[in-house]
Image (tube, rainbow, N blue to C red):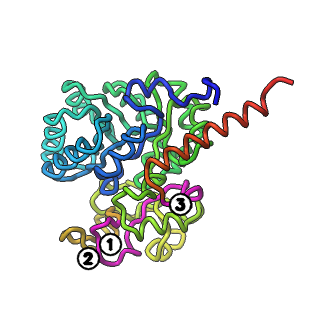
Amino acid sequence: MPDRYRLRSPVCDLLGCDVPILSAGMGGVARSELAAAVSQAGGYGILGMVRESPELIAQEIDAVRASTSRPFAVNLIPAATDPALLDTELAVCLERGVAGMCFFWDVVPEAVARAKAAGCLVLHQVGSLAAAKEAEAAGADVLIVQGVEAGGHVHGTVGALVLVEQVVRRVGLPVIASGGFASGAGLVAALALGAQGIHCGTAFLATRESFAHDDHKARVLAASAEDTVFTDLFALNWPPDSPVRVIRNSVTDALGRNLMGHHPDRLPREVIGSEAGRPLLKYSTDSPLRTTSGDLEAMAAFAGQSVGLIDDLPAAAERIAAIVSEAEATLARLDRWLRPT
């Protein structure tokens, strides 16, 4: 492949990765095994430690480092975390000298400033142009711009095709495109929009190293893009008005068209399972993990519209290799189509 097809954008030098493919910091799912595998394969792994204990965070950071010497980040969500817990979460990350922190949801300048003061690279996931500007003003180094196609919690209403280009035009930071990106063609499209890479959740949830339950992975493989729904029904454990994208199930089907308008204070508290001894409630944001038992079908199976592109369950390194190979083939095809005659 000619040198001009080398898939290394400027953000790779900043992050310390070989290819501009980031794994999402999916809470519960993106444990050390997945983050380490992505980084070791040349991508940039993000450890999902949302509302986890400092002890588990320390354990998972150490486990990543035991598996790879490549850079990675830790994902926390200040707006959805009790301030006292957030304080201790950040403390353990900084004490262990984590090179990168990734924040999501509302921009909390104090959290960004604390990470920056400790020498951390700060990635901030945003869902709107306004939030992108807030993150830039707070001192973030990289923006992960999330379109409404994304799985899990979605913080905006605009599709990635428009939102990514809009942010690239108006904000001076490197942009990583998120929401619907799971293939080489998607990576090329993101680069064409001005992004410097892609941030993939669903594509890495469906890998062997993912900590998601096998049932969740199977549902991703079986689903089409049309099988995902955008709803605020799975609202317990998060601030109000926090919509998610999940694979439809009996719980969402029972709503008919009434997918929005479900305030967590008005939802019943019904135990439907457990996760490592912790009771899980119906309508919570907990997705089924390897250690989860109970009514798995009724739980939130987070997935983006890119499920329509996922039909296998490879190792994370194989997923990255496939995306890179597809991107090279896409660029070669475009070169043939667009070459002057």
Label 3 CA crowd tier, 10 Å (few <14, some 14–19, many 20+): some
Mark 1: amino acid: Lys
The residue sitting at 64% across, 26% down in the picture is: 2
Say which residue label 1 marks.
Answer: 282
Say which residue label 2 marks.
Answer: 271
Image mark count: 3
The residue sitting at 42% across, 46% down in the picture is: 155
Asked whether, in this view, residue 118 is left or right of residue 220, the answer is left
Q: Which residues are magenta?
A: 288-313
Mark 3: amino acid: Asp
User: How far is disc 2 from disc 3 in space, using C-alphas?
Assistant: 32 Å
Image quadrant where residue 111 sits: top left
Quarter of the image that includes the N terminus: top right
Between 249 and 40, which is closer to the camera in this rendering?
A: 40
The residue sitting at 30% across, 43% down in the picture is: 75
Label 2 CA crowd tier, 10 Å (few <14, some 14–19, many 20+): some
Q: State which mark lies toward you, 2 or 3.
A: 3
Give residue 22's mark: none
In this rendering, is residue 85 above or below 331? Answer: below
Image x and y of residue 123, in percent: 35, 33
Image x and y of residue 109, in percent: 27, 31
User: How far is disc 1 from disc 2 in space, using C-alphas?
Assistant: 6 Å
Are discs 1 and 2 less than 8 Å apart at CB? yes
Mark 2: amino acid: Val
Sequence order check, earlier mark of 1 and 2: 2
Image quadrant where residue 187 sits: top right
Say which residue label 3 marks.
Answer: 312
Residue pushed farthest top?
Answer: 172
Quarter of the image that includes the C terminus: top right
Residue 123 drawn in magenta: no
